[in-house]
Image: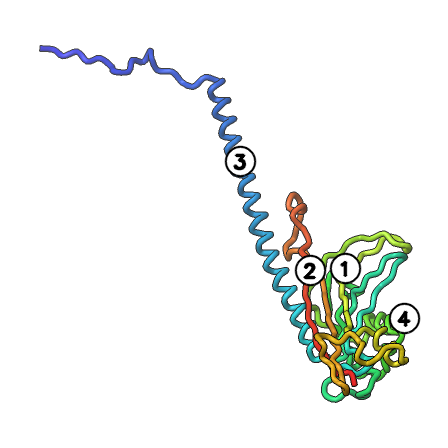
């Protein structure tokens, strides 16, 4: 007895993909690959930005901690509040980017003021490296600081910034620098700002010294005043803008958004 076998899938019924089907398959694979590439790029940018944000945050914390420590150990006396701000001026624009703190190591050379240059701690952008915020000191400089004249103080501080005898500590190298058009052309301006508020203010204190304002009528902080003395508050506010600490090039450049960091601290001292 013979058995006859028959193929279950006849050769005549087999066929390959047509050209149109191949093109569609290639197109779908290309779309999937492009989508994956875009997703990978987004993840890379997000990861870089996250790391850069963390780096910038750490830099800002270090900078403000240094500034706060200096301000809290500032020496102040009568018309010398211990903390000053100088600014660059270009036409109608002002840039209050330099903080000066009177921080002697021990008893000041002139306890009643004025301070000496060697007793100052200066926080400012480095003129030679605008991305750097530096802490600057000038040991051994016995020059008296003209704190009662803002223009003279500004000129002295600006000369110290480029002094060969100055000692600098870089607090961050991530300062955001922008190009600003001014009266002298386009200049690079680091995004740094300091504001010092005195209560009672210098004007109020001078008004008392000249007899125009009574002692009890001065705006003492929280009413902290007696017949013998009152408390003056020195309030410092600061803002620095930092660029995330990664290299932003090509398609990632659009993500290089500067991050603003704000800091605030204060101290008080006695006015007799």
Q: Residue at x 59, y 59 (%)?
A: 54
Residue at 56 percent across and 39 percent down: it is: 38
Q: Nearer the viewer, mark 2 or mark 4?
A: 4
The percent coordinates of residue 101 (x first, y second) are 76, 76
- Is 270 above or below relative to 258? below
Q: Disc 1 or disc 4, which is closer to the eye?
A: 4
| Label 3 secondary element | helix
Query: Between marks 2 and 4, how big is the CA–CA gap?
Result: 29 Å
The span from disc 1 to disc 4 (Cα, nearest Å) is: 21 Å
Q: Position of residue 7 (x, y in %)?
A: 24, 14
Give the image quarter of residue 192: bottom right
Tell whether 95 sits left or right of 2.
Answer: right
Q: Nearer the viewer, residue 61 or 118?
A: 61
**Residue 151 marker:** 4
- The front one of 269 and 148 is 269
Alpha carbon separation for disc pair 1 and 2: 10 Å
Q: Which residue is mark 3?
A: 35
Whether label 3 touches label 4, CB < 8 Å: no
Q: Residues within 10 Å of mark 4 (few under 14, many from 20)?
A: few
Crowd around label 2: few <14 · some 14–19 · many ≥20 (10 Å) = many
Question: Which residue carries the number 2 mark?
Answer: 174
Residue 190: assigned label: 1
Chain-order first, disc 3 or disc 4: 3
In the picture shown, does residue 158 fall above or below 138? above
- Dot placed on the residue nearer the N-terminal end, 1 or 4: 4
Q: CA distance from mark 2 to mark 3?
A: 34 Å
Tell me which numbered mark, 2 or 3, is placed earlier along the sequence. 3
> Which picture quadrant has residue 87?
bottom right
**First in sequence: mark 2 vs mark 4:** 4
Q: Position of residue 222 (x, y in %)?
A: 70, 75
Q: Earlier in the sequence, mark 1 or mark 2?
A: 2
For image coordinates 89% across by 80% down, the residue present is: 211
């Amino acid at each position: 007895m013979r058995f006859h076998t028959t193929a279950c899938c006849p050769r005549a019924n087999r066929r390959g993909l047509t050209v149109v089907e191949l093109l569609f398959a290639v197109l779908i694979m290309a779309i999937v690959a492009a989508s994956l590439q875009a997703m990978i790029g987004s993840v890379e940018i997000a990861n870089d930005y996250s790391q850069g944000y963390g780096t910038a945050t750490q830099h800002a914390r270090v900078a403000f901690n240094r500034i706060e420590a200096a301000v809290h150990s500032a020496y102040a006396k009568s018309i010398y509040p211990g903390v000053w701000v100088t600014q660059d001026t270009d036409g109608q624009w002002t840039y209050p980017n330099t903080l000066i703190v009177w921080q002697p190591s021990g008893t000041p050379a002139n306890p009643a003021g004025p301070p000496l240059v060697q007793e100052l701690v200066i926080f400012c952008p480095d003129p030679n490296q605008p991305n750097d915020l530096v802490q600057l000191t000038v040991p051994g400089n016995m020059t008296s600081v003209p704190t009662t004249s803002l223009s003279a103080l500004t000129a002295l501080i600006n000369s110290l910034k480029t002094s060969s005898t100055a000692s600098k500590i870089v607090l961050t190298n991530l300062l955001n620098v922008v190009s600003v058009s001014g009266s002298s052309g386009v200049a690079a301006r680091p995004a740094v700002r300091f504001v010092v508020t005195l209560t009672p203010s210098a004007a109020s204190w001078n008004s008392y010294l000249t007899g125009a304002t009574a002692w009890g009528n001065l705006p003492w902080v929280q009413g902290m005043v007696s017949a013998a003395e009152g408390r003056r508050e020195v309030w410092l506010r600061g803002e620095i803008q930092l660029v995330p600490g990664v290299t932003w090039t090509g398609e990632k450049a659009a993500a290089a958004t500067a991050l603003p960091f704000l800091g605030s601290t204060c101290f008080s001292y006695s006015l007799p």
